[in-house]
Image (cartoon, coloured by chain):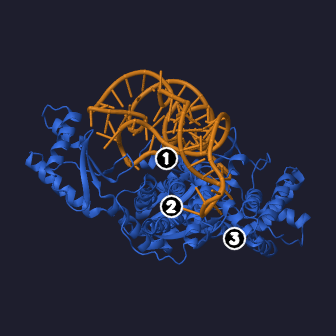
Chain colours: A blue, B orange
Amino acid sequence: MFEKEKSVVKGLIHNFLAGEGIEDPQLEFRQIPFSGEWGLAVPLFPVAAQMARSGKKVNVPKYAQELAEKIKTALSNLPLDFSHVDAVNGYLNLYFSTGVYARRVVDTVLEQGEQYGRQEVDTGTVMVEYSQPNTHKAFHVGHLRNVILGGSVCRILEFAGYKVIRANYLGDIGLHVVKWMWNYLKNHKGEEPSANKTHWMNQIYEEADRLFQDPENEAEVRALYARWNAKDPEIVALWKKTRQWSLEGFNQIYDQLGEKFDRIYFESDVEDPGVALVEQMIEKGIAQDPRPEEPVFIDLDAIAGTENEYRVLVVLRSDGSSLYATKDLPLAIKKFEEYDLDQSIYVIDVRQSLYLKQIFKTLEILGYGWADKLYHLAYDLVNLPGNVTMSSREGTVVLFDDLVAEATRLARKIVEQKNPELSEASKDDIAEDVALGALKYTMLSRDNTKVVTFDWDAALDFNGQAAPYIQYAHVRAGSILRKADGLELQEVDFPSDLEKAEIDLIELMARLPVEVTRSAAEYRPLTIATLAFDLAKAFNDFYNTCHVLNAEPSVRAYRLRLVAAAKQVIATSLNLLGIKAPKVM
RNA sequence: GCCCCUGUAGCUCAAUUGGACAGAGCACUGGACUUCUAAUCCAACGGUUACAGGUUCGAGUCCUGUCAGGGGCGCCA
């Protein structure tokens, strides 16, 4: 927003330093930490350090301060809209005229509306593969982190200028599917899924998993697996039908979460191509085939000339059946055949880091030039208190629909208290927006590399640094604007003696574009989550200290614009996190 | 044994990527609703950034080592 100012200032400082005999100085702009006034800070330590390195005997901090003071004097005629300049602690601080800055930020936000913050600097097509659930099984809190992270990263990348293709990869084959079908045929034949399809599918799966412990049952499942492998038409038909149920169940969940996929890949689609690819790799001498004693493998370290870095990747079982690696290789290739990708991102938990590194390396060895465009976006697990991993065998898994139901019930109770006069339908909507928002925010407000510890109390705590707090600020802003209906939102000047609360709020709004770029570059929704909270906090502070509707007309005029702009930026940041911003709550 | 991640206030987490005084929330304590929605705000309390060295004008951030926790390392997914 201040590129022009930056380049002008940079030019002036360059000229001055050149006069001092300093060529090609390292100049950068930072934010001035003290709130109350805006400006650009130029640290002069790098320049002073340059001098020190060039042989001159200087005390760096002292010299930096001297330089800052000299430049300050030289800049007596301030260009553009700067009001004053200071030299402090080795920094040259250039302050903007408050009113001019404030108006520029607010006008920009209102002019660009929901496009404010959108960047066009990053272009290209990027595919993001995320969610990747197994059909016929449950959807639990661990899966939730993946979807929420992947979904938010997609929104942020789009907002940063990329064309994003959302991909999902479903585990629709394997022992778990056969177990499920066996139990269905034996104990549930003819049944149809209940309203909550994923829940119903999972119940049958968990029962199957228990029964599988009995050797007699296991033998039956193995027999069914053989029929499945032989492509018995009856079993294939059942598989397709039940897979569809699972898909519909997942779509219920994705709808609720606001996620949509552009391309769905099935494990079953890449199994045969994978086996064929393994045969090719054996022919080329890339893979070794000691079957039947041992499985087909690739000695990556031997090929790459490394030690203990890539290890060994097993690509086919000794009985010829496929593994994850068998299928991930052709899948990667398929993606680049179908789309012209500049980047292909895998949102998968951190435990698979080595595995994905091996897959990427193998594709490089196979000669695919795009292998360097593959990126593993790793995130850590969702554990239970005491760092206990959730396990369906232990019965410690928290299912998605149980969690959402409980959170929604609680949110609904609070809406009932706060706003009893609302219609039942809108109470329901608000409760769901609040509940899902809270769950999403919990997942997105910690770094990808950190373990999320799930506990019910924290998940259902709607106070403090949480989505409902941010949503509430948005509601308050909307409420003011609604009551101001009839008052024109005309462009007006901002005074130079703004309140601290107003200044803080405007400063945060101005940061959105930069944060979008950074968040996209790092695949970290966290930075947006932090900004959203800071914005809400600043707005609530403003709300308490600065009255809008009953302020005198000249003040009211610019504050109304400020409120409208703040509402917009809060809504945009929530949207980037995939969190709904309700109108009332 | 080797590799990766993590370690910051009692608890859960930030920290503009090496910059100015390490900041929030929760909890605890004390205050604020005849005023735009109190799902709010204000104040107070809380720190040897795991430890020890090193690099640097400057280190929570980079390097080395140690300790602690988690994860990964040939036919699981």
The first of marks 2 and 1 along the sequence is 1
The chain to which mark 3 is attached is A
**Between tags 2 and 1, which lies in front?**
2
What amino acid is labelled 1 in the image? Tyr
Task: Find disc 3 in the rendering and name its residue.
Answer: A251
Question: In the shown orientation, is residue B38 left or right of residue A564?
Answer: right
What amino acid is labelled 2 in the image? Ile
Task: Find disc 1 in the rendering and name its residue.
Answer: A310
The chain to which mark 2 is attached is A
Question: In the shown orientation, is residue A127 left or right of residue A86?
Answer: right
Which residue appears at 76% of the width and 64% of the height? A136
Question: In the shown orientation, is residue A256 left or right of residue A218?
Answer: left
The first of marks 2 and 3 along the sequence is 3
Element type at marker 2?
strand
Write down the quadrant of residue A536 in the picture: bottom right
Q: How far across and how far down the image is residue A176, in percent?
A: 76, 59
Q: Quadrant of the N terminus of chain A?
A: bottom left
Residue neighbourhood size for the residue with mark 3, other residues' Cα within 10 Å, grouped as few (<14), some (14–19), many (≥20) = some
Q: How far across and how far down the image is residue A75, in percent?
A: 16, 52
The chain to which mark 1 is attached is A
